[in-house]
Image (cartoon, helix red, strand yellow):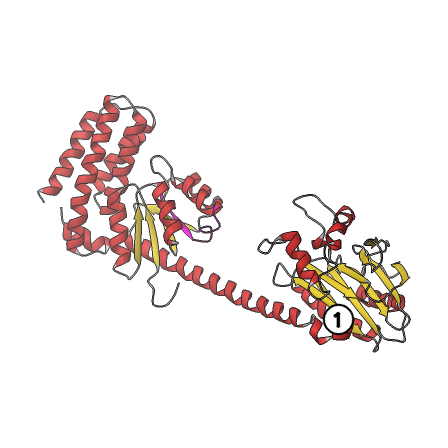
Amino acid sequence: MGNTQPYTVLVVDDNLVNLKLIEKSLSKEGYLIFSADNGPDARSIALDKLPDLILLDIEMPGENGFDVIKKLKDDAATNSIPVIFLTGVSEVDAKLKGFDLGAVDYITKPFHPLEVLARVRIHLKLSIATNSLIQDQAAKLRQVTKAQVAMMPLPEEHPHAKFGVYYKALQEAGGDFYDILNISDKITGYFVADSSGHDIETSYMTASVKALLAQNCTPVYSPAESMKMINDVLVEILPQGKYLTACYMHINRTTMKLTIINAGHPPVVCQPVQGDSFLIKSEGDVCGMFSDAHFGIETLKVSRGDRFFIYSDGLVESAEDKITWVSGADGLLPVYETLREVPYDRAPKEMISQLFGNNSCPEDDIVLLCIEV
Amino acid sequence: MDFKYLASKIGIDDEDFMELVELFITTTLSDLDKIKQGVAANHPEDAAAAAHSIKGAAGNMGFEAMSELAKKMEIQAKAGSLENFDAHILDLESQVNQLSTN
């Protein structure tokens, strides 16, 4: 609805006199009118022209007004177009049914053209205000998205960390995030988490956890101590019912020792230079729910060239196919094997491409890190 | 019938009103044919639908007597009765024809 384009109104009535009367009354006030004298034509014009408002007669032969609005509301392209019913004065049940089906108002017949004009104006104003609010909120959410993405470190900013990443948030405020922690020249922390939500609160959680990681992942604390301190703070600050699943991997490239702390997160995939890929399964409580949480802890010796994959459940779960990460993680091991020759910084994108194709849309947020020792 | 008054009452100019009157005559005569067919076939629901159409259009144009008669016919036909419809049809036809000689 731009300033220079006229507002458009679709008028639907099987009586041509009523159609013409409304058309004349509204067009002389600057509205562009489309008209239809039956339901199927009305739906076809609505879909084609996407009018700013629809005036719809209820009692029509064949497909009546109820049928029309039901189909318009079922179609994503037309369901936000406000519909005003034209109805007889005594038809109370019809008015209620019209509202139930999504009409914004009704006009009783016989109608006065000036009343029609007044109601069209008020509902267009409401529609403009609502659209403006939606645009405003969407713009703010886009800022949140930008801020959240900006918090994720890029591989080129941390060349010594030797990692590649794929990150995709389905909504403006994604529930997944990751961080890279430069604990010392030779010690790096890799943190991947999935929070229980995709809302604005979640995006604040990302900032909070990032700050906690910076404060607590230092050479002074062991990985288990770092995670315990982060958990204790999150228990205090997270809203009730919110929590994280998280995986914190700590690699010391001097001692070649790797530690994984698992807080209810899908298992890390280990791809040793020698031998087949396998899952490092360790059970643990989620993070941010219990002050006495127990996390899974695994330590192992690693060799130069070994690879590890940390990911969120969106990679391995499918609500549509009823696959949970418990079974989904095992099923993907052969796919990791196909990535051995792909450089680690390109492996995550290659993996996503193999799993979802280049254009398909995953069902959930996804973060996938590939780390090479 | 004072068309000038009716035009100003519904807020449109005289020329547009005359155009609507012509359309009303055509549309209503067509609806009257549907009522006649409904009576001939003893299909009160068809007659009710056509009477409903006349009622709304006549009401919107300010032709209150026609709207009232069509309303009476619609209610009666919806109740399943077509009694005296021949007389009602003649009455409506007469009122419509008067519009063209106005």
Q: Residue lying farthest left?
A: B101
Residue A10 is covered by the magenta coloring: no
The percent coordinates of residue A225 (x first, y second) are 89, 68
Vertical side of A80 occupied by A345: above or below: below
Compared with residue A304, is residue B54 higher up or lower down, i.e. above or below? above
At 16% from the left and 49% from the top, the residue drawn is B19
Q: Secondary structure at mark 1?
A: helix
Above or below, comparing residue A329 to residue A350 in the picture: above
Q: Quadrant of residue A224?
A: bottom right
Name the dominant secondary structure of the magenta segment.
Answer: loop
- Say which residue label 1 marks: A210
Q: Nearer the viewer, residue A179 or A142?
A: A179
Q: Residues within 10 Å of mark 1 (few under 14, many from 20)?
A: some
Task: Give the camera-side residue of A353 and B33.
Answer: A353
Q: Position of residue A358 (x, y in %)?
A: 59, 56
Q: Position of residue A296 (x, y in %)?
A: 88, 57
